[in-house]
Amino acid sequence: MRALAVFGAAHVALYLTSCRAQHLTDLSCQTPGSSGINWPELRSNLSFYMGMNLASDDITLDPQSPVFRDAWDLWYKLESDASLAVKAESECMAGFVTLKMLAFMALSEMEMFDEMVKAEGWSIHEVFRFLAETMDWHLIVASGWPLFGMLAKCEKAAIERLAIHSPLNAYFESIWLSEVPFLQNIEGYLRSWLSVPIADSALVLSYPETSPFARAIGMLALADTARIPRVPLGRDSGQTIRLVRRAAYLLNAELLTKQFPPIIVLSLRWPKFQLLDRLSCSPEVVLRLPAAASVRQPKLAVLPLREKVSDVVRACQMPYCDLDFQELALRAAASASSPTAAGRLRIVEVGANLGDCTVWAAAHFGRRLVRATAVEPVPVIADALRRSVELNGWRDRIEVVEALAGNRSGQGTLHLLGQAAGNPFAGASGSSFSGIESTKLGVKLTTLTELMQNYPRVAVMGRKLPFRTMTLLKIWAYGDLLHVLRGAPPGLGRRVDAVWLAFAIDHFTSPTRAAMHLTDFFWRWRFVLALPGMDSNWCRSPRRDHRFQFSSRVRSFIRKNHRKGKVMTVVAFKRGSLRCPPLTSSLLLQTGQDASSGPQRQQDQVEASPRPIGCFFGRSARQSELQEQGADYESYFLGPEFPRL
């Protein structure tokens, strides 16, 4: 790796000459280039990869990821071919520099430190020179490339471990002692995933003797707050862009153009790259759904900061919704249909998060989704969900309830049990865990009985009805799952046709006992229980008592996956309520020979870049088998079954 780095240094002069000559106009690189690099696909892959690496405090990246290996092979190819490197850099400067940064972060921590203390180098030095060449940092922010995200990861680690030893920190803080409280506040807001209040930024900018570093940070923080939750920076009216350009000018003049070693730039306590990275987080995403959707490009509001779910949505341009739930909804709608009319749906989603599944259902089914209720207790996430409803004009069909579902109504406490996999709200629960400190939020409590009081009873299919309306209940409540079910209305079996729920094993003191309570609950209402992640024919009603077999499989799964952070998907449905042909070799053969990719489908695939494989999560065993035979996302991995659903 080191030998390759030295070889790459020979191209530095050529790279910088081309860099100075190019005017920055479009850094997003929307089309594949003549170099043979698919820049949109690379940008999507790197954004997804960085989002999945948020959970680690390690400054280095995970080299085991297929995305990393593909990007590393591309960088190796560019560094080994000078003419190809120049062509790639001229096509997509931001992508080229981001690859340089990726190569730097692939080193061990000791190698990275050795490189950062040098005055000249082969990768991160070029990144800083690239930033010093332009004031158009807002174009980098709006491009979608995770360059500032990588720099922010390095900066955060450098500040936490090395800032106290930086001579510039001691020098600047001795001159501008009055700025230290503001700096500490900024650090606190970033740690808490909060935006810096406008008053804080305005106050530090109002002092004429403020240091250029504090002024730059104040401008970036003000730009971040001013653009939430309105529009991405690339479509800003101009005021936010001017703030970013002014901050870039100050940081360049006082820091980058003075050619300090990278260790000085990164360990300087003012969190410049962390704020620039936050500005890179678009507050809304235009989704790309299959051609069969009623609305192919709905908008989904996400959190304008680094958070796993929002990052995955931004990188994948698809809802963060388990594909086996989408399969359940498709089967339910098909089962409610008749030869003369399409079936309709009602959905109640408890633990909606950003409302990805509700938004997907509204977009795919259109007016066939007659009503949806999305329940989310975290205020900032509920606000984003309401914004999605407004953006798409669905207020008449989707109700957002900001509350915590449980076994009683009233007022209660939500415990944020800490960051998990880059999500500051993962593990949010109405119950506290012994010995674990947590952030607490006062929230409204509600029950399924209250949520469904205006939902009509399930209609029974009759000869005179051209269609029926199926009611689905989706629950993702971590350790509160049983509390949610205890709050269900007495006639649940007459109000709901099918239930999808996530059983988070490690969130229960006794997961086996909790699973048995779950089984007993649905058995009383005569629901069929299925494990879509394990059974290819999960959606077929068994002809005999399956309770013992189901319980045995659940116990086995819990025993093998306890304390591994696993989640088990369970579906409960009325016997005979779902249409599901057996998954036979003939059906798999149809999938392999499927010729459904007509001209429109081929055109769609040309215009839309491939998505990272990690985008397609939560597949059922049936979807996974059909995918192996050639089914893709255009059919929700259901192949020849999909046109009939």
Image: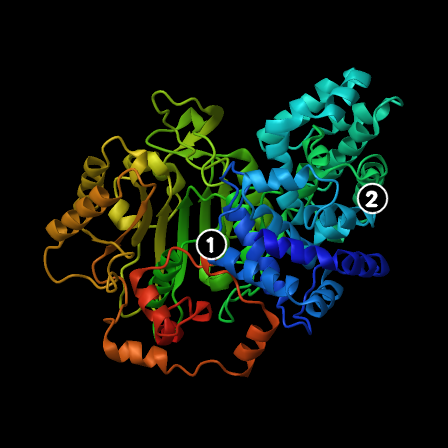
**Residue 20 image point, x, y percent:** 84, 56
Kindly tell me whether residue 236 is visible in this rendering. no
How many other residues sit within 10 Å of disc 2, few (<14), some (14-19) or many (≥20)? many
Residue 245 higher or lower than 627, as above or below: above
Secondary element under disc 2, as helix, strand or loop, is helix
- Residue 460: image quadrant is bottom left
Direction from residue 516 to residue 52 in the image, left or right? right
Q: CA distance from mark 2 to mark 1?
A: 35 Å
Q: Nearer the viewer, mark 2 or mark 1?
A: 1
**Residue 23 image point, x, y percent:** 84, 59
How many numbered marks are there? 2
Direction from residue 41 to residue 170 in the image, left or right? right
Task: Name the residue: 36% across, 38% down.
Answer: 478
**Residue 295 image point, x, y percent:** 55, 64
Amino acid type of the residue that numbered disc 1 sits on in the rendered structure: Ser
Amino acid type of the residue that numbered disc 2 sits on in the rendered structure: Arg
Circle 1 sits on which residue?
65
Residue 466 higher or lower than 532, as above or below: below
Kindly identify which numbered label has been placed on residue 245.
Answer: 2
Residue 621 higher or lower than 592, as above or below: above
Mark toward the start of the polypeptide (2 vs 1): 1
